[in-house]
Each structure stands twice: as C-alpha cells, then as structure tokens.
Amino acid sequence: MYVEDDADTRELVSYLLARAGYEVVVAENYKQAARLAQATSFDLYLIDNWMPGGSGIELSYWLRKFDNETPILFYSGAAYERDKQDALVAGAQAYLTKPANNEKLVEEASRPIVDARQSRTAVNLVHVAASGLLGM
C-alpha cells in the first residue's frame, strides 16, 4: 500500500512500481490507509510522513499495533534526521527522502519485500523440517 496525498507523486510512484511488477494499492490520507490496512494484507507499506488526518509516524505506530511483520518504508520530503529517527522508532525499516532517483525508489521499495518473503520462506522451511516432512 502506498500512502501519499499529492496526486502527481502518487501517480508517478504507482507507475514506477507497477512497471517493476508490483501491484500498487493507494491511499490519499491516514483514514483511507487505516481502512485498507485493516481489510487487506500487503507486502509493504510505503508511507509519506505528511498527510491529511494524521502523520506517517502516527500511522506507523497504529499499523504496528496489529501488524509487526509487514515492512514499512517512508518516502517523504521530511528530510531532517529527527524525522528519519522518529519513523524508525515508530516501526519503519527504512526512510527515503524525496525526491529520489526513480531506480533508487524502486530498489528501496523492493528490498524489504524481498527480505520479508525470504524470511517467511525460511520460517516455513523450519516448520516443515520440524514436523518431519522435509525428508519425505
């Protein structure tokens, strides 16, 4: 899910990620994002820090109350080191400052998705091995 209040940025980032093979679900504000997060599971939360109805930091804290696994990447114009630290404390894995090179944005969005998928695969293999099914 990509949360961004600026329509032009939302369209550009959605296009770049779709071109890289990702299905992108967008939200324009905190309230929309919260509703979508409760109704659907995602591989990544890509969040702007400034949005109507609440901040990305607040949204990140809220997401972590019920979802500790889905990676969170901030993509925001809030460029102070304090902004980045607040996002990481709130549960984000990474913080990318706008504007970013298109390739860098796609790379940074892809990394936590791939890492999370590999982690889930490793956990599933451990569960299979522990149940004795691996050697059958």
Image (cartoon, rainbow, N blue to C red):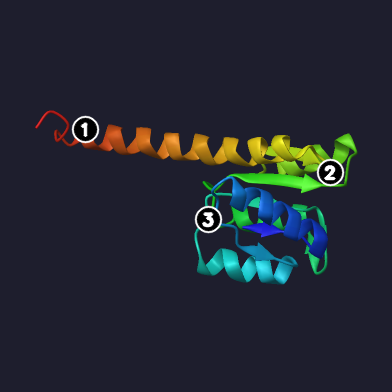
The residue at which mark 1 appears reads as: 130
Q: In this orientation, does residue 92 appear?
A: yes
The residue closer to the viewer here, 109 or 15, is 15
Give the residue type that dot 3 points to: Phe
Q: Which residue is mark 2?
A: 98
Nearest-to-viewer mark from 1 and 3: 3
In depth, the one of 3 and 70 nearer the eye is: 3
Quadrant in the rendering for residue 99: top right
Residue 78 position in % (x across, y down)? 88, 46
Q: Residue furthest right?
A: 80
Q: Earlier in the sequence, mark 3 or mark 2?
A: 3
Q: CA distance from mark 1 to mark 2?
A: 45 Å
Q: Residue at x 14, y 33 (%)?
A: 132
Q: Position of residue 122 (x, y in %)?
A: 36, 32
Foreground mark, 3 or 2?
2
The answer to whether residue 119 is left or right of residue 20 is left
**Could you tell me residue 89's position as x and y percent?**
72, 41
Q: On the picture, is 77 further left or further right than 91?
A: right
How many C-alpha atoms fall within 10 Å of the one at disc 3: few (<14), some, or many (≥20)?
Answer: some
Q: Residue furthest front?
A: 19
- How far from the left and from the top, in percent, is residue 74? 73, 46
Q: Name the N-terminal-most of marks 1 and 2.
A: 2
The secondary structure type at the circle numbered 2 is loop
Label 3 vs label 2: CA separation?
23 Å
Instruction: State whether residue 65 is above or below residue 111.
Output: below
For the C terminus, give its image quadrant.
top left
Q: Identify the mark at residue 42; answer none if there is no mark.
A: 3
- Category of crowding for the residue at label 2, using alpha-carbon neighbours closer than 10 angstroms: few (below 14), some (14–19), many (at least 20): some
Residue drawn at (64%, 46%) of the image: 72
Residue type at numbered disc 1: Ala
Residue at 87 percent of width and 34 percent of height: 81
Q: Please indicate, yes or no, whether residue 93 appears anywhere in the rendered image.
A: no
